[in-house]
Image (cartoon, helix red, strand yellow):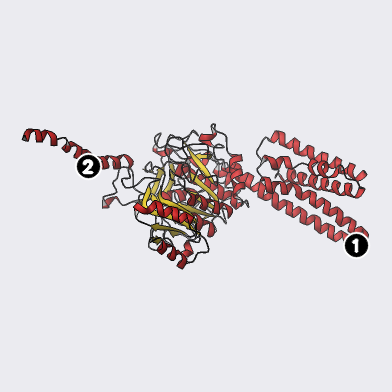
């Protein structure tokens, strides 16, 4: 009897051991025992409330649902995104009721975001071997700049001769940035980096201390202090950073904080948002926040993910965002990079499997590889580290976007077109998007687009000044004729600009629209009266002058694309325009 009992009970012993070991194995395999990206938080619901709802209205909603409601104060939460904590067993019913409530614009289960699967930090030794090439533009005096092979791949030295990001604000939504808020530490190579409107959405305070190191490294690529005789360089080093902490010391954070931070950035003047974070599942509240920011003129750049397989993470997969995949030092898709049809562009992300010096080098606070987080002796240190990942690729694109914005191009669709149009093709669009980021070409096209608008307005102002001065000495009838003719020229001159405004300056439709055939053939050819034909001829003259000015100033819309075909096309249209003007005036 006892023997039989022992035979029956002994299998429970190894089974109990197996159950005890599973969590340890899981933690070892993932490096994160407590959470994963996309994990739904039981009993937490996120609501996007009407923007006119007051604090008392928010509290009343919480009471109506018997829930504890929390979120940043209204001053930092104009989008009214709050978290409701309800009993997990009633969460589904509460979610359905919230979605039907007129005070609620959207409601979703709470889930987690994280930095893309973190691939480790490698301490950078001074004077580590790196490629050395002659300078082809402006070169900063940072002593370790020669180790930033990634900047040479995207032609930063040439790009800096046109733009360094002055006047632009870049929001870094991440683990915070070590910029010395209050009693916090400021990393050594951020001494001259400026910041504006920082906020910690986890702790609810305006001091987003970085307790992970990821956010500081990302921010360094964007705007680390440059030409200061210390460390390395940043891409848009004259831009200001807006550090927004939404991820904790383990690299995880709530969807509610991410969505609130996106809206906060848009409301506080950010021109570019960098999100080197993601989740495996979409949600309406984050998507609405991205739509809101884009409508306010913010360019949003996001990491594709480090899952080494097809499937772009969110929010990168949203059409409002620019999804960035990562390249290794040879320009091939990095082994860890996620990819998919939503990929917009690729940029250097590094590959420390080839060599530690093949990572992306920036100053940050990090724990060297192999050290434990449990020992007090292993406090993160302020040093230079090589990281790798789509997290590192993303700030390259965000930094160049800031350089483009600094040239005067503010529309996020236009910034995206410039980045995409000037990218160097690499192959499969699902892996590389439009191709590899080319900072010099992108900033060149951005400068051309902005310079085109300024040049056009200057030319138009000079033209009308001359017309006004000349008409003062004319008889009334002659003055009316001159002003009418000037108006016709002005309308024609502005037509291509209108095409560019609607189609986008970097669009092929803009190139096609820059044709004097449009106003003449479509409007003037069948005109019945000599006066109408004269007006349309003068419109054709205005278009011809516009095209000639673009070509003369080097600001034609085809900048960088099949120049051999576009140049003859544009000059031919100028000549056709002149011929049509002459014929129209003779008729």
Q: Which mark is residue 473?
A: 1
Whether residue 188 is visible to the viewer of this picture, yes or no, is no
Which residue shows up at 92% across the image and 62% down it?
Answer: 476
Mark 2 secondary-structure assignment:
helix
Q: Which residue is mark 2?
A: 20
Tell us which disc is closer to us: 2 or 1.
2
Q: Position of residue 153 (x, y in %)?
A: 52, 38
In the rendered structure, find residue 269 and report the number of the disc placed on it: none
Question: Would residue 380 appear left or right of 423 to someone viewing this image?
Answer: left
Residue 385 at what x, y percent from top left?
Answer: 39, 45
Give the left or right position of residue 79, taking residue 495 as reference. Answer: left
Q: CA distance from mark 2 to mark 1?
A: 98 Å
Q: Is residue 243 above or below residue 121?
A: below
Which of disc 1 and disc 2 is earlier in sequence? 2
Could you say which is closer to the camera, residue 300 or residue 7?
7
Q: Quadrant of the N terminus?
A: top left
Closest to the observer, 50 or 22: 50
Task: Residue at 59% x, 52% y: name it.
Answer: 406
Looking at the image, can residue 219 be seen? yes
Say left or right for 15 vs 216. left
Residue, far top? 427
- Disc 1: CA contacts within 10 A as few (<14), some (14-19) or many (>=20): few
Instruction: Looking at the picture, tell me which residue is in the foreground, 127 or 497.
Output: 497
């Amino acid at each position: 009897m006892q023997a039989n009992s022992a035979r029956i009970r002994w299998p429970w012993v190894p089974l109990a051991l197996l159950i005890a070991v599973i969590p340890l194995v899981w933690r070892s395999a993932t490096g994160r025992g407590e959470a994963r990206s996309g994990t739904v938080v039981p009993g937490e619901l996120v609501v996007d409330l009407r923007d006119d709802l007051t604090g008392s209205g928010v509290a009343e909603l919480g009471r109506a649902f018997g829930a504890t409601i929390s979120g940043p104060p209204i001053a930092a939460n104009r989008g009214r995104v709050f978290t409701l904590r309800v009993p997990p067993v009633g969460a589904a019913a509460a979610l359905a009721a919230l979605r039907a409530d007129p005070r609620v614009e959207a409601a979703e289960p709470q889930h987690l975001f994280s930095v893309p699967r973190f691939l480790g930090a490698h301490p950078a030794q001074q004077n580590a071997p790196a490629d050395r090439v002659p300078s082809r533009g402006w070169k900063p005096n940072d002593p370790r700049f020669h180790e930033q092979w990634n900047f040479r791949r995207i032609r930063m030295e040439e790009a800096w001769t046109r733009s360094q990001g002055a006047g632009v604000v870049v929001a870094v939504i991440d683990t915070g940035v070590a910029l010395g808020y209050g009693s916090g530490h400021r990393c050594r190579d951020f001494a001259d980096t400026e910041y504006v409107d920082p906020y910690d959405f986890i702790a609810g305070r305006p001091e987003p201390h970085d307790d992970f190191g990821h956010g500081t490294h990302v921010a360094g690529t964007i705007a680390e202090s440059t030409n200061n005789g210390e460390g390395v360089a940043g891409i848009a080093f004259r831009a200001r950073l807006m550090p927004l902490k939404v991820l904790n010391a383990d690299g995880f954070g709530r969807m509610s904080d991410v969505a609130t931070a996106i809206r906060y950035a848009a409301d506080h003047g950010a021109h570019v948002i960098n999100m080197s974070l993601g989740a495996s599942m979409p949600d309406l509240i984050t998507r609405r926040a991205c739509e809101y920011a884009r409508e306010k003129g913010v360019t949003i750049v996001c990491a594709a993910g480090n899952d080494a397989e097809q499937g772009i993470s969110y929010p990168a997969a949203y059409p409002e965002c620019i999804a960035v995949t990562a390249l290794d030092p040879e320009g091939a898709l990095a082994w860890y990079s996620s990819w998919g049809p939503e990929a917009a562009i690729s940029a250097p992300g590094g590959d420390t499997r080839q060599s530690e010096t093949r990572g992306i080098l920036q100053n940050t606070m990090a724990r060297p590889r192999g050290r434990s987080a449990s020992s007090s002796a292993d406090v993160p240190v302020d040093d230079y580290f090589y990281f790798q990942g789509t997290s590192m690729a993303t700030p390259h694109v965000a930094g160049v976007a800031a350089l483009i914005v600094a040239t005067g191009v503010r529309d996020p669709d236009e910034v995206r077109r410039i980045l995409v149009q000037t990218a160097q093709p690499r192959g499969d669009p699902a892996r590389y998007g439009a191709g590899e980021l080319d900072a010099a070409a992108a900033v060149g096209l951005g400068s051309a687009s902005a310079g085109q608008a300024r040049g056009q307005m200057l030319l138009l102002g000079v033209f009308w000044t001359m017309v006004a001065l000349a008409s003062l000495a004319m008889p009334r009838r002659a003055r009316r004729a001159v002003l009418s003719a000037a108006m016709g020229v002005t309308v024609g001159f502005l037509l291509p600009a209108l095409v560019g405004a609607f189609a986008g300056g970097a669009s092929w439709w803009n190139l096609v629209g820059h044709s004097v055939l449009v106003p003449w053939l479509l409007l003037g050819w069948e005109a019945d009266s000599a006066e109408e034909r004269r007006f349309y001829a003068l419109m054709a003259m205005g278009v011809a002058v516009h095209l000639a000015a673009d070509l003369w100033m080097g600001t034609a819309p085809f900048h960088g694309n099949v120049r051999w075909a576009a140049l003859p096309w544009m000059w031919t249209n100028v000549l056709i325009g002149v011929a049509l003007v002459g014929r129209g005036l003779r008729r």
